[in-house]
Structure formats: C-alpha cells, structure tokens
C-alpha cells in the first residue's frame, strides 16, 4: 500500500543549546525530548532522505498490525514495523541500537574489571580543511586506523603492555573547517596499567597514525592534539560508557541538546555541529544543513560505526547486543496500516502515544507495595489513555479478537481507580461511543497477532550496517 509523504512541523530555529554534564544513555534527562525529536526527524526523512531504506523505515508493517508495547519497567515502544536498522542515518533506529550497545559496553567494562584488567580511552584525530570531502576523509581515516592497529611498532608495544584489543568508534562533526572525523577506541589492557603505560601506548599509536595519514595524502597531526590516551576509572562503568558513547554519536542531543565529548568536556567544540544536529537543523528548514546531511547519508552508508576486536569479544564472551532490547512487554494497542498512517500524519503522533502510555503507567504503578498489582494497574491505565487518545484523534485501532470467526471484539474491559471504564464490544455493539468502539471491516482477517494484554517478546532486529 502506498504511503503519503509526511512533512512534520519544523523545529524552532531559536531552540537554545545548553552545555551539560555527561549523561548515561538511558538517562531520563532529555530522553522524552530526544525520542520526540528522533521521530520528528524520521518523519521528515520519509520525504527528504536519499536512502530508500530510511525512506521506508517504520513506514510499513511487518505483519498485520503495529503494536504499542509496554514493558514491566514502564518503557513503551512500537513493534511490528519494518526498520532500516541504520545507526548513522536513522534517528529512531540509532537510539535503539546505541542504547543496546551501551549496555553491552558497560557489561564489558564490568567483566574486564573483575578479571583485573584496565581500559584506556584512545582518541585519534586528523587535520582537515573545508575543501576535503567527507568520503575522502573517511577513506583516509579508515585506512590509517587499520594500518596503525596492525603496524609492527604498535604490535610490539601492545604485546609489552598486554593490550588485548580495541573497541573502536568513529565520530563526525561539521564546522567552519568542514568535516571533522576522529576515532575513539577503548584499549583493553591485561592487569593494572599506569599513566606511563598510557603515554607509551599513545606515542606508539601517534607515530604510526601520523605516518599512515601522510601516506594517504593527509597532513601529519600534532602529538599534543592528534593523539590522546587516558586510563578510564572503572569504578563507575556507566559513567565510563557515557564518556565513550556520547550524545555526539547518538540522537539524544537532538532533543535535550546536551552534548558531551568523549573526554567529559564541553558542548560542540568551536561551534561544530554533530550529524544529528545537522538533521535537526535540516528539519527546521536549514538548506545548508540539508545538503550536509545528504553528504553524510551517502558517505556513512554501509560503514561500521562501532567495531569490536575479535580477541576482546572472545575473552569477554558477552551476549550479542541484538538481544539487549529483547524484553518481555505487553501489547496495549494495535493499529492497522490505515490507522498507523493516520497517527504518523499527526505532528509527533508516534512519540506522543509512547509518552501517553508511559505517563499513564507511571501514574498508577507506584501506588502501593504490591508490585504485580501496580503493574496491572499501570497497564490498564495505559491501555485506557491510549484508547481515549486514539478516539480523540479519530483513529480506529484493531479490536482484540478472541475467536478467529468473530468479526469484532473491542478493547479488553479495563477499570482504573479513577472510575473510567472501557467496556468490551459484544457482537459489534458497544457502550462506548466514538471511533475506538466502531467495528472495523475485515478485522478478523487482518489481525493475526496475540490479543491485547498479551505479554510477548520483541522481534529480532534486522541486519544493520554500523
């Protein structure tokens, strides 16, 4: 089924940027705003992205319905939508993937600390100018890193210091001097490392890094600013991960605008904009930002933004990151294709429903000591508020089907403490007036998933680049 182009309202250009401390991914600070901005960005990309996979992301259904899910922690998400999985060009998929990666990285730091190891944060930068294209800079950076990691001098120092391997991440910003690419890598070191060990590793990396950049036609970076190696404090793994996967690399900065660099420093050095800020500004009507975003889409397509060394992965034996979001959740609303399109035509429609569900859950799930009963009350409140919101929006959800040959069964009968009730529909009749209670033709044929109120596990992630 063809879908309509959706161009949501632009983001106000006057939105102020504020400096802020390092925040862990998953922090409640700014998460609602970031989610809203991410969905707004994706809806804009439906019309403006030059990547077909992003144009189609979350736009169609895997099966018959788009399901609004609510976990036992009160976190809402959409399930049943086709996703692109891009960590570089899709703000909605990127938030989900980077959150999973942060969990895996934190688990890695905890496991490595228990084994008595140390971790150093390596930063490698390269000199650049506004005349150089992002594609050329990326090719030079990737080639120089690969050569540096396996150079004879670096391998000798790694062996002497007990450096098992790296977890490498690429970060990009754009400023008055054009695109700026740099590498942040976590070096996993056996045993307790000292500052002089970090300095020795830094000298070795810089010598090789500088030589290989020059071999690719780039200017040699200065040692004082081109290479930095610092030992991480593993007493707080969450803070260490927050300093490594920063809001520069994730869409968290799109909403709260609280960005940190990898060294726990300041917001947007020298006025540089992250790629997610470029997207946010493009949504707001900045034509230059739109052109830069298109350049970023093309250059980053198929690139791996985060890579794990094989020895590090083998030693830590961590659960694959794709399973990090595979949490049990309950279906609280089901939308067919027409209803999903209607929600997406509303400004911030998809993110607003998620926020409504989470807010309703929180309002009822903290009232007593019985956690199970609180969870049930929270689910009921969320189901009711979402149903009433859809009714206000004139959007008809898929009713709950209890039998295959039954044409229409309405929402599960739920009653919350404030006395509001949604009654089940019987044989196409209901005490509830409005779109949410009207029979939906063909519902029995289209609704093949589990009924409302059923706990299910998330669909596996699609294969993704990066």
Image: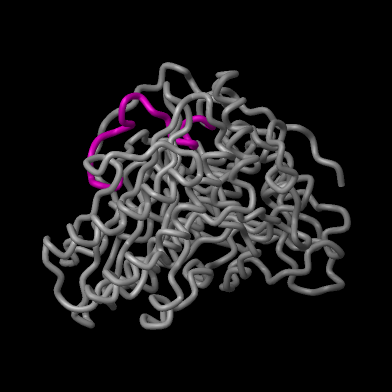
Count of marks overlaid on the render: 0
> Looking at the image, can residue 375 be seen?
yes
Residue located 60% across and 62% down the image: 413
Q: Quadrant of residue 427?
A: bottom right
Residue nearest the viewer, comparing 257 with 450? 257
Residue range in magenta is 262-279
Residue located 47% across and 27% down the image: 178
Provide residue 289's location: percent of width, then percent of height.
Answer: 55, 24
Provide residue 294's location: percent of width, then percent of height.
Answer: 63, 32
> Looking at the image, can residue 360 be seen?
no
Q: Quadrant of residue 286?
A: top right
Residue located 31% across and 30% down the image: 269
Residue located 47% across and 32% down the image: 179
Q: As displayed, is residue 100 above or below residue 126?
A: below
Q: As displayed, is residue 160 above or below residue 377?
A: below
Does the magenta portion include 240? no
Residue nearest the viewer, comparing 77 with 175? 175
Residue nearest the viewer, comparing 185 with 212? 212
Locate residue 65 relative to residue 405 in the image: left or right.
left
Quarter of the picture containing the C terminus is: bottom right
Provide residue 1's location: percent of width, then percent of height.
Answer: 87, 47
Q: As displayed, is residue 124 above or below residue 102?
A: above
Locate residue 441 relative to residue 345 in the image: left or right.
right
Does the magenta portion include 278? yes
Locate residue 117 relative to residue 32 in the image: left or right.
left
Provide residue 285's location: percent of width, then percent of height.
Answer: 58, 19
Residue nearest the viewer, comparing 266 with 347? 266
Q: Which color scheme did the rendering employ for the protein? A: one colour
């Amino acid at each position: 089924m063809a879908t309509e182009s959706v161009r949501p309202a632009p983001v106000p250009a006057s939105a102020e940027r504020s400096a802020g401390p390092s925040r862990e991914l998953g922090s409640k600070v700014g998460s609602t705003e970031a989610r809203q901005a991410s969905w707004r960005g994706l809806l804009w990309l439906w019309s403006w992205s030059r990547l077909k996979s992003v144009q189609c992301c979350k736009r169609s259904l895997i099966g018959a319905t788009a399901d609004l899910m609510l976990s036992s922690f009160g976190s809402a998400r959409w399930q049943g939508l086709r996703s692109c999985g891009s960590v570089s060009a899709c703000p909605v998929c990127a938030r989900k993937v980077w959150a999973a990666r942060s969990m895996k990285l934190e688990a890695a730091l905890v496991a490595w600390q228990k084994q008595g190891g140390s971790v150093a944060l390596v930063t490698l930068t390269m000199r650049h100018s506004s005349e150089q294209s992002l594609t050329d800079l990326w090719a030079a950076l990737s080639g120089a890193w690969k050569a540096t990691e396996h150079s004879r001098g670096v391998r000798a120092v790694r062996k002497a210091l007990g450096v098992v391997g790296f977890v490498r991440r690429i970060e990009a910003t754009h400023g008055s001097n054009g695109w700026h690419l740099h590498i942040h890598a976590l070096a996993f070191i056996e045993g307790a490392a000292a500052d002089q060990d970090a300095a020795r590793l830094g000298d070795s990396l810089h010598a090789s890094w500088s030589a290989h950049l020059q071999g690719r036609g780039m200017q040699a970076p200065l040692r004082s600013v081109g290479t930095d190696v610092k030992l991480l404090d593993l007493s707080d793994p969450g803070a260490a991960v927050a300093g490594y996967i920063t809001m520069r690399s994730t869409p968290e900065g799109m909403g709260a605008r609280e960005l940190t660099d990898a060294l726990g420093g300041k917001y947007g050095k020298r006025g540089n904009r992250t790629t997610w800020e470029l997207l946010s500004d493009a949504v707001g009507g900045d034509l230059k930002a739109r052109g830069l975003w298109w350049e970023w889409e093309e250059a980053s397509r198929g690139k791996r933004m985060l890579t794990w060394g094989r020895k590090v992965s083998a030693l830590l034996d961590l659960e694959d990151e794709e399973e990090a979001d595979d949490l049990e959740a309950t279906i609280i609303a089901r939308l067919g294709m027409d209803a999903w399109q209607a929600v997406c035509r509303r400004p911030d429609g998809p993110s607003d429903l998620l926020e409504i569900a989470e807010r309703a859950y929180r309002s009822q799930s903290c009232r007593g000591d019985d956690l199970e009963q609180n969870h049930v009350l929270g689910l009921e409140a969320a189901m009711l508020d979402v149903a009433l919101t859809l009714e206000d929006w004139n959007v008809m959800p898929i009713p709950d089907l209890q039998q295959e040959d039954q044409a229409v069964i309405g929402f599960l009968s739920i009653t919350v403490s404030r006395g509001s009730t949604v009654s089940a529909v019987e044989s196409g009749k209901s005490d509830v007036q409005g779109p949410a209670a009207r029979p939906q033709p063909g519902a029995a044929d289209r609704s093949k998933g589990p009924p409302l109120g059923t706990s299910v596990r998330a669909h596996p992630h699609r294969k993704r680049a990066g």
